[in-house]
Image: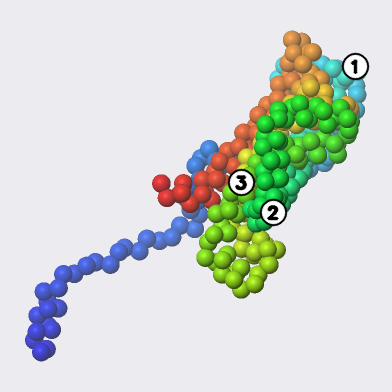
Amino acid sequence: MTDILDAKILDAKFIPAPAIRPRRVLAWPQGVTLLVAIAAVLALMLVLLAIFAPAIAPFEPDQQKLLARLRPPIGFERANPAHWFGTDQLGRDLLSRCLHGLRLTLALALFGTLIGLALGVSLGLVAGLFGGWADALIMGLVDIKLSLPFTLVALLVIALAGTDVAVLICVLGIAYWAHFARLVRAQVLGLRELPFVEAARACGATRWHIATVHMIPNIVSPVVVMASLNFSNLILLESALSFLGLGVQPPTATLGSMVGQGRDYMASAPWIVAVPALLIVLVSLAAMLLGDALRDHLDVRLRER
């Protein structure tokens, strides 16, 4: 018996163990491209500039120096070293106004995203869980919202309620709530037929328990992705409204209002428009790239390709 075992052992093929590679302490995250990394660094820098704008800005954003009006940025003729990005038509420091305008623009887009998210997720959960007349009513409102041009709705609301900051936040908040509601309803309709939800329902769980314990944790990923993408859209929307004079009113600065106020000086002082417009492009592009990367990372179907 021992001879037979020895012969089998000798005849067996030797399979080498896989080589153990040393782990790298600093490894490049899987699926993160160079473009996404640059966007993340850019977004972090812009957010930090917005947070610490009052400490970084060399001047008050509304401080006027008429003797220093329309000074170009550093590197051009007649530039003032105290004003890195130049001055506007009233002699206000463009760097200080851009920092404070970036701060307010990001805050408006953030609060608008949170309002739309809260409203849309709540209505989507109600429509998906209760069904019946609640579902028909909410989806009817969603269809009406999506069928109306939002610019006209925004103009009507601002004309009736004024151009206060709180009104602008509410206008931005209702911009994309229907998209959240439709997404969440579709997710809930798919989840409520799964075995673990039916088991919870069979055990006597209330709709509130099912929504908070079983539904919301499973819809976080698509909701976060949509919120990140809508954030960049709200930046552009706020800039457009401020450009048209329907956003925050002077002398308070936002990036869109700075572009709108400087368009009359495009020929003689193009930096008044170019600097805030470049910031709008950078912020929107960084938010959009991060949203796409987040979608690719959280979507299982895209990761399996």
Question: Which is in the foreground here, disc 3 or disc 2?
Answer: 2
List the residue tagged with mark 1: 67
* Residue 183 marker: 3
Query: Within the image, what quadrant is residue 78 found in?
Result: top right
What separation in Å lies between label 3 and label 2 (alpha carbons)? Answer: 13 Å
Q: Is residue 19 above or below residue 51?
A: below
Residue count near mark 2 (Cα–Cα under 10 Å), binned few <14, some 14–19, many ≥20: many
What separation in Å lies between label 1 and label 2 (alpha carbons)? Answer: 60 Å
Amino acid type, residue under disc 2 in the picture: Val
Amino acid type, residue under disc 3 in the picture: Leu
SS of the residue under disc 3:
helix
SS of the residue under disc 2:
helix
Which of pointers 3 and 2 lies earlier in the amino acid sequence? 2
Give residue 127's position: percent from left, percent from top: 67, 51
In-image side of 300 versus 131 (left or right): left
Residue count near mark 3 (Cα–Cα under 10 Å), binned few <14, some 14–19, many ≥20: some
Query: Within the image, what quadrant is residue 261 found in?
Result: top right
Which of pointers 1 and 2 lies earlier in the amino acid sequence? 1
* Residue 126 marker: 2
Give residue 95's position: percent from left, percent from top: 78, 29
Front one among 109 and 258:
109
What separation in Å lies between label 1 and label 3 (alpha carbons)? Answer: 55 Å
